[in-house]
């Protein structure tokens, strides 16, 4: 990655979940690196990204830092002003808030992410970001959202935080690589006509 250290201070790379799952290697760059507690929790244990991340944490290469509440709240204000809040998970908000906090601490933060919502809010906050291709990662991670209650699946940009059928809060996971080129089953694009309307707040 080309380093563009600017006037504000030392470069700090903030890593999001998509970066780690897509294969970002903290040991491949020299800059200080940070991530948020929720990012660690989103990585499946005993996978390659998990091992890489664990090693990087234990050696001090990546530091986990929980953003202070005040920065989380400022981030939420930015996100909701943009209408992006539905697409941002708690983890995404932590990542953005952490970058904001690091900047206040005198760093020059850069978020390593392929997530469009994070990128949008970051640019609104005047925080730099770089797509993972800048770090030598070719694969673009595809997310899917799913309902932990009834197991229905939703597209990553589905405009509600909750399942339209059972109302459970949706979670997300990376779409398995071998599924990317196939038609994913059960993805709900819009409310089926025969379903009862349980989620009035989704109406535009
Ligand atoms: Zn459901």
Image (tube, helix red, strand yellow):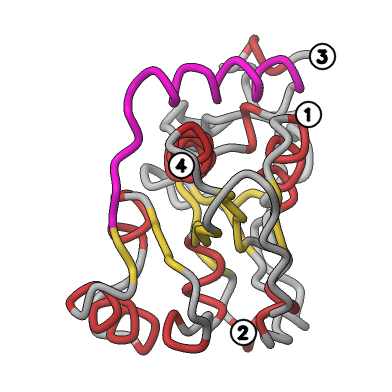
Q: Secondary structure at mark 3?
A: loop
Q: Which residue is mark 2?
A: 177
Mark 4 lies on residue = 102
- The boundaries of the magenta stretch are 64-82
Mark 1 burial class by Cα count in 10 Å: few <14, some 14-19, many 20+: few
Could you tell which of marks 3 and 2 lies nearer the N-terminus? 2
Quadrant location of residue 139? Answer: bottom right
Answer whether residue 33 is visible to the viewer in this image.
Answer: yes
- Can you tell which of label 1 and label 3 is closer to the viewer? 3
User: Ligand 1: does it lie within 8 Å of the C-beta at label 2?
Assistant: no
Mark 3–mark 2 Cα distance, whole angstroms, equals 33 Å
Say the numbered circle drawn on residue 149. Answer: none
Q: Nearer the viewer, mark 3 or mark 4?
A: 4
Instruction: Say which residue label 3 marks.
Output: 204
In this orientation, which residue lies closer to the viewer: 72 or 191? 72
Estimate the x, y position of residue 137 in percent, counting from the top left: 67, 85
Assess whether residue 137 is covered by the magenta stretch: no
Q: Secondary structure at mark 2?
A: helix
Residue at left offset 64%, top offset 58%: 186
Against 69, residue 4 (above or below) is below
Residue at 39% across / 56% down in the picture? 35
Mark 2, mark 4: which one is toward the viewer? 4
Distance from Cα at disc 3 to Cα at disc 4: 37 Å
Nearer-N-terminus badge (2/4): 4
Choose the circle earlier in sequence order: 3 or 4. Answer: 4
The residue lying toward the viewer, choosing from 51 and 189, is 51
């Amino acid at each position: 990655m080309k380093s563009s250290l600017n006037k504000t201070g030392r470069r700090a790379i903030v890593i999001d979940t998509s970066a780690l799952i897509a294969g970002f290697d903290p040991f491949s760059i020299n800059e200080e690196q940070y991530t948020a507690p929720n990012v660690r929790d989103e990585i499946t244990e005993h996978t390659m990204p998990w091992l890489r991340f664990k090693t990087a944490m234990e050696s001090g290469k990546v530091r986990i830092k929980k953003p202070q509440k005040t920065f989380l709240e400022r981030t939420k204000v930015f996100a909701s002003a943009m209408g992006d809040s539905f697409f941002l998970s708690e983890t995404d908000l932590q990542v953005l808030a952490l970058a904001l906090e690091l900047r206040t601490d005198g760093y020059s933060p850069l978020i390593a992410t392929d997530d469009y919502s994070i990128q949008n809010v970051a640019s609104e906050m005047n925080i730099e970001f770089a797509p993972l291709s800048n770090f030598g990662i070719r694969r673009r991670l595809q997310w899917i959202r799913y309902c932990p209650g009834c197991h229905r699946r939703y597209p990553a940009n589905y405009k509600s935080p909750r399942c339209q059928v059972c109302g459970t809060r949706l979670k997300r996971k990376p779409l398995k690589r071998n599924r990317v080129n196939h038609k994913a089953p059960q993805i709900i694009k819009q409310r089926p006509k025969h379903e009862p309307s349980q989620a009035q707040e989704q109406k535009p």
